[in-house]
Image (tube, helix red, strand yellow):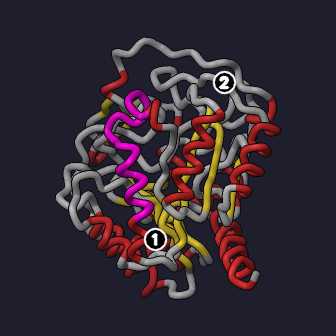
Amino acid sequence: MPCRGGVAGEPGAPDISAVPTLIDMRQEGENGGEVRPRHPEKQGRPDAPSPRKPDWIRVKAPTSAGYHQTKALVRDLKLHTVCEEAGCPNIGECWAQQHATFMILGGICTRACSFCNVATGKPLPLDESEPENVATATAAMKLKHVVITSVDRDDLEDGGANHFVRTIKAIRAAAPDTTIEILTPDFLRKPGAAESVIDAVPDVFNHNLETVPRLYHSIRPGARYYQSLRLLDSVKSRDPNQFTKSGLMVGLGETKDEVLQVMDDLRVANVDFLTIGQYLQPTKKHAAVDRFWTPEEFKALETIAYAKGFLMVSASPLTRSSHHAGEDFARLKAARLAQASA
């Protein structure tokens, strides 16, 4: 799954983030009829308790008028956002500024990553109006930069690649001045799918490695580390001018040396932009937090990553792939220009 779960805050504490619909383990079925477990594959697992969240990881629950306006627009157009579905702790900040990451291909994922809060199960048929609805929302919100992600759709012959292409084209038509960042699945065993999305020329092609290779079996069992690396490398091979981006979570039991090795692997693939954030456990049925990395440790990772040659690095406890994406894209372009003129 190309996103990461986690709701910041402690249950019962009124001044920290616990976005109401995100910790609900149940999801309404089609037409509001069926009610099913949000993560049926996790229901039989024992609880995995995590350590108490430190002060630096806490954020307030969203209450602003801007937040509610964004929420209303998303509901009116029947769109999904990874902000809600994956339990992003930054939803209050971003939605207050009318920044949202749209999630296409429906709201049910075919994989069952142990870190992710997006619902899993058998997906519904594709909503053919979704690309145009995303474009309408992009234009209505007057977004300068939009991020489009998706669930994994292993059930589709192309993994949903054509839906990405249609969405990019629809946004170009409805909001030609908006820059487009996509956060894609790995398109595992989907020949030609990645190439069609690359050829749609998004401004930023993002695919998250999420964790270190040693933890893939338990954290991303449906994914393959080197497939993800090959995907990122293929973007640069096919279109050297396209910006590439990837993200990591820490706090799942990885070592610092393993994180540094992933940085090296990404640089071999010529990835421009790296994000590193703290994993937050969405529910007790998900993977436990091994530990909370300190802000000082994140700063050290950022310094090392820049030294390894990334054009842009965002590393902090609450960093997420699309947090401040528009501002970061402007900085990314400036960094490339500075490098070219050096």
Q: Amino acid at mark 2?
A: Arg
Relative to 188, is 96 on the left or the right?
right
Q: Secondary structure at mark 1?
A: helix
Magenta run includes residue 223: yes
Residue, far left: 157
Q: Report whether 22 appears left or right of 173.
A: right
Q: Residue at x 59, y 58 (%)?
A: 322
Neighbor class of circle 1 (other Cα within 10 Å; few <14, some 14-19, many 20+) is: some
Q: Is residue 97 magenta?
A: no
Q: Which residue is mark 2?
A: 291
> Which of the two discs, 1 and 2, sits closer to the camera?
1
| N-term-proximal mark, 1 vs 2 | 1
**Whole-percent x, y for residue 134 in the image:** 43, 70
Instruction: Estimate the x, y position of residue 216 in percent, counting from the top left.
Output: 42, 34
State the residue position of label 1.
Answer: 236
Q: Percent x, y for residue 240?
A: 48, 77
Q: Residue at x 31, y 31 (%)?
A: 36
Give the image location of residue 192, x and y in percent: 23, 67
- Please state the total of marks drawn on the protein image: 2
Above or below 240: residue 90: above
- Stretch of the chain drawn in magenta: 216-233
Identified by mark 1, the residue type is Lys
Residue 113, image quadrant: top left
Identify the residue at horizontal 43%, vertical 12% (top origin). 46
Depth order, front residue of 82/252? 252
Q: Main secondary structure of the magenta part?
A: helix
